Image (cartoon, rainbow, N blue to C red):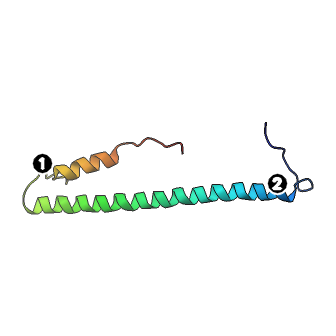
């Protein structure tokens, strides 16, 4: 059964407090998810930069599979492939 829908004339202090508590919980959850997303984006950026360095080092010493593609180190290529794979969506 759903809770009664309050109006400005019928809402009680307790019901209003409950609504604010529920909204606050949702805002905190949103803030937590945003922080996790920002941290994940930063980690991907660091990993991508590391792959760039690995490729540059491999190029400078003349190793690699495909000079034309710019991806010359197999480890960097594998990491880039994994980062490009679609990810499952979490429901939580």
- Which secondary structure, mark 2? helix
Res. 15 mark: 2
Residue picked out by circle 1: 65
**Left or right placement of residue 65 versus residue 17 in this view:** left
- Which secondary structure, mark 1? loop
* Viewer can see residue 69: no
Q: Quadrant of residue 58?
A: bottom left
Picture coordinates of residue 46, whole percent (x, y): 32, 62
* Viewer can see residue 27: yes
65 or 45, nearer to the observer: 45
Picture coordinates of residue 22, whole percent (x, y): 70, 54
**Left or right placement of residue 77 versus residue 10 in this view:** left
Please name the residue shown 60% across and 59% down the image: 28
Res. 84 mark: none
Please name the residue shown 79% across and 36% down the image: 1
Picture coordinates of residue 57, whole percent (x, y): 14, 62
Q: Quadrant of residue 4?
A: top right
61 or 23, nearer to the observer: 23
Quadrant of the image containing the C terminus: top right
Residue farthest to the right? 9
Count of labels in the image: 2
């Amino acid at each position: 059964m759903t809770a009664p829908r309050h109006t400005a004339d019928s809402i009680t202090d307790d019901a209003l407090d409950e609504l604010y508590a529920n909204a606050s919980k949702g805002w905190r959850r949103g803030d937590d998810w945003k922080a996790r997303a920002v941290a994940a984006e930063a980690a991907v950026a660091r990993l991508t930069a590391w792959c760039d360095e690995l490729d540059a080092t491999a190029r400078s010493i003349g190793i690699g599979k495909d000079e034309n593609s710019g991806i010359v180190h197999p480890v960097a290529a594998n990491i880039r492939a994994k980062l490009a794979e679609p990810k499952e969506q979490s429901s939580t």
